[in-house]
Amino acid sequence: MTRVKRLPGIAARALVVGLFVIIAGLPVYWMVNTALSTDAELYRTGQDWWLHLERLVDIPGTLSTVPILKWMTNSAVIAAGTMTLSLILSVLAAYALSRFKFHGKGVVAFMLFATQMLPEALIVVPLFAIFVSLGLLNELYGLVLANTAFTMPVAVFILKAAIDKIPHETEEAARIDGCPRSSQLTMIILPLILPSIAAAAVINFFDGWNEFLFANTFIADAEKWPASVGLVSFIGQYGTPLATVMAAAVLFTIPAVVFFLVVQRQIVSGLTAGAVKG
């Protein structure tokens, strides 16, 4: 009887969730639909609401005129480099801010926070001058450094909040047993904050994967463009191949979705991986 009474509430929640899924998924569906449409349907007769899956075989030919795989490889290099470098630096910085006492600690935390107050567009010109002097123009690792400077502070605060929740007694017990400070970080702290590391990794990866402003400004060689800049290059003065753009956009979306699904599993496993006994 109790289950019967709960059915209306369950149905209402399912309806709301389904509505949100439709709202969120409709742009993606329309992107795929546009990629499978012809120029006549896009510009004259109008698109159909159903997918013409038989046109999937035409996608490779549509994308054969542009180096989309090369651009996606460049995006992957920027995203992976930004994520790796940012996580390494943010773990060390978060541990220092959480566990050590030193003069200027509050100033350091404020300066990290202050980096998020300025939009990226505001510092493009001075950053361009720095890149010229350091020889970083037209280099992917220059974009990695630029993106790391913006994403690392966010990761630092995420990881610091997670480390603050770990009791100091855990490390003190390990220190009594002769565990060095570096091992306390790698063997005790990191496994316990794995969900937060995964969350920071997602933020850092997506920031590097969606890189556009710095790449559009600092990269002149089309072979080194990330996919985001490559997609914009399709826009022409007299016309834009919408089907090609959307087909490339679908390919550009797939690796990011796969990465999120993989990291999502790690977040769930990290939440149940271990606990601190009181």
Image (cartoon, grey):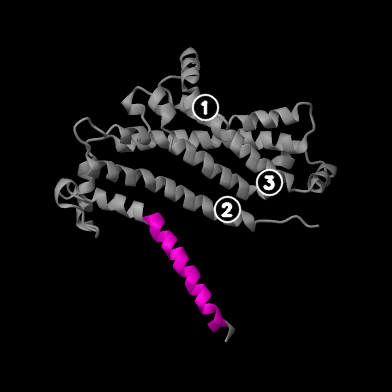
Residue underneath mark 2:
267
The tag on residue 197 is none
Instruction: Please tell me whether residue 191 belongs to the stretch shown in magenta.
Output: no
User: Residue 232's x, y, as percent?
Assistant: 32, 34
Please identify the quarter of the rendering in which residue 200 is found: top right
| Depth check, front residue: 149 or 221 | 149
Residue 54 in picture, x, y percent from top left: 20, 57
Question: Residue 4 versus residue 149: which sits nearer the camera?
Answer: 4
Residue 162: assigned label: 3
Helix, strand or loop at label 2? It is: helix
Identify the residue at image location x=39%, y=57%. Answer: 23
> Do callouts 2 and 3 mark residues in contact (Cβ within 8 Å)?
no
Q: Position of residue 226 (x, y in %)?
A: 38, 33
> Tag 3: residue type?
Ala
Estimate the spatial distance between the alpha carbons at disc 2 and disc 3, rounded to whole Å: 13 Å
Answer whether labels 1 and 3 touch (C-beta < 8 Å).
no
Q: Position of residue 66 (x, y in %)?
A: 25, 35
Q: Main secondary structure of the magenta part?
A: helix
Quadrant (top left/top right/bottom left/bottom right) for the C terminus: bottom right
User: Among all residues in the image, which is located at the extreme right?
Assistant: 176
As drawn, the residue found furthest toward the top would be: 133
Query: Furthest-bottom residue in view?
Result: 1
| 10 Å crowding of disc 2: few (<14), some (14-19), many (20+) | some
Secondary structure found at label 3: helix
Segment colored magenta: 3-25
| 1 w.r.t. 146: above or below | below
Q: Which residue is mark 1?
A: 145
Q: Earlier in the sequence, mark 2 or mark 1?
A: 1
Look at label 2 and name its amino acid. Answer: Ile
Question: In front here: 206 or 82?
Answer: 206
Report the amino acid beneath label 1.
Leu
